[in-house]
Image (cartoon, grey):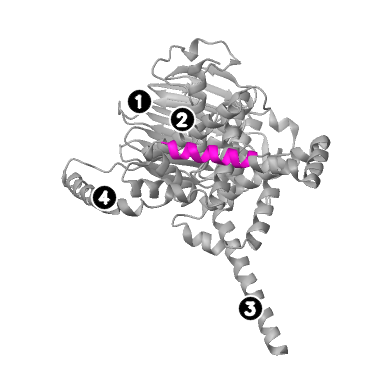
Amino acid sequence: MTLMEEKILQEDVGYALMRLYSGELSEGEVAMIQQRSKAEPEFRHAYLGALEEIALVSSLEEKGQLSTILAPPKKNFRWLAVAASMMLALATTWFFMQPAEVQEYTDIKRYVSGVGEQRTITLEDGSQVSLNTATQLLIEMSDNQRRVILERGEAFFDVSEDPVRPFVVELGQKQVTVLGTSFNIFKTPDAYQVAVVEGLVALHDPMEPVDDVAVDLSNLKQGIAAPRKGLLRAGWLASYSTDSKHLDVVQPESMTRYSDWRKGWIQFDKEPMSDVVKELNRYAAKKILIEDKAVMDVNVTALVSVTELSATLNGLEQLLPIKVTHHFDRVVISEK
Amino acid sequence: MKHTHKKVVDISSARRCERNELVQRLFDKHGAGVRTFLRGRLVPDADVEDIVQDMFARLLTLDNLEQKMDASSGSNIALLLTMANNMVVDRARKLSVRQNYQQAAQLEQEEHSGGAGLEKIIADQRELEQVRRVILAMKPSWQKAFLLSRFRNLGYREIARQMNVTVKQVEHYIAQAMNSLRSAKRRNYPKGKQS
């Protein structure tokens, strides 16, 4: 390990510890720390070592040995301290009288949508974030960045351009950085799916700088180990597996699936019933089950509503050779 | 006589009841945060609940909990996180001793002879002294942010307000402070031997 790498590692450890003790650690950050520790024994070692050290510090306190550090200045210097504090007070007054000084504040908010619920948030910069069913995210707007931690679920981002404040979406093992564009992210425990509708985004490892990304993900072969960073262009869909760490990049025939859910619609195009039901179940409080194996392979081409699921199921029943039965705790689809 | 005795029992059980409620409230409020902390601290999922239970039990009998909570003007979660980290470190230490019979036997012998035990105490003292020196040598801003966070149990936002800087700056100070503690440790124990 070079001196530079060592320094970077130390800084990453310091940052991770700072977040750990913030009391606001997100699931995404937990995943990041766990993944990094698994992949890099040096990180794990440094991180756990520092935590032992912190435990030692708290024993210092219990023995009262820190009182010397925290104690007020010695008696004979007290007048000096008073004079100094008066000067400081004057300086502070002067400082606050300067009109240009604006107190910068970090503002973290949490947004959650329930099963079957969709909502759109407009941020102070004009960007819009739409949450699909069962989604949870944190948004932090500060002076030098706009940060979203997508904890779970699916969200569509319509980002206002702001060259000095990159817009970052943290996913855990990967994150997405943009300057101005619209894109959709669907996160499950074992996969992240990023679809770019407009513009360009960088998909990269959390600690990776993005000012010099050269890899165009659409040129890569299917199912390769994900590079540390790469660019994803409009019209492309990248799926990352958190288990295999592999990336699949494809150009879907249509991008409507990744943006039209915001209007409450999903277009299925020759998709097997099993996939359709899986998708609809994301919105369903009462889960849908397929009883007959033959039904699973029935091809579905339809534009359906996800907000009116029972109407959708009735429609599908008319259209396809299936029978829908509503039970008190579930909906069962069988062969007609 | 009988009457007084009954009264004493009543008071102590009332106090126990109060403590019980206090601890319950703490966990209702911060239980999720403590669990996230533990998982972020690389505690295996299977052990997280064990440690939470241990913490609960310890808090019920801790001597000066109410005082400690009053002393921390910030949110009490920092108090719980410090405790959680200490419990994980203690557990690991006990476990490694238990796993290493030879070490255990040695430890027992040390306890009997008394001499080597003293050596251990001195080594601990030396390490504590080292940490104290590192804290004293920190840049004033790092030191202040770190101490306010670790010992006054203040949140980063509250520290930012007290120090009149931004939250981002506080985060930077704390990351740097934790960093320098870590480098001190590395100088003490050259790399490669630890697992």
Q: Secondary structure at mark 4?
A: helix
Q: Residues within 10 Å of mark 1 (few under 14, many from 20)?
A: some
Which callout, 2 or 3, points to the residue nearer the camera? 3
User: Earlier along the polypeptide chain: callout 2 or callout 4?
Assistant: 4
Of badges 2 and 4, the one in the foreground is 4
Picture coordinates of residue B86, whole percent (x, y): 62, 46
How far apart are the alpha carbons under marks 4 and 3?
A: 51 Å
Chain containing the residue with disc 1: A
**Left-right relation of A251 to A146:** right
* Camera-side residue of B105 and B156: B105
User: Based on the displayed image, in which of its 4 quarters is residue A162 positioned?
Assistant: top left
Q: Is residue A240 above or below residue A323?
A: above
Location of mark 2 (residue) = A184
On the picture, is B85 further left or further right than B71?
Answer: right
Which sits in the foreground, B166 or A65? A65
Inter-mark Cα distance, 1 to 3:
64 Å
Q: Which residue is mark 3?
A: B11
**Chain assignment, label 2:** A
| Residue range corresponding to the magenta coloring | B123-138
Left or right placement of residue B45 versus residue A159 in this view:
right
Query: Measured from the top left, where is residue B179 in percent x and y?
Result: 49, 32
> To which residue does mark 1 refer?
A179
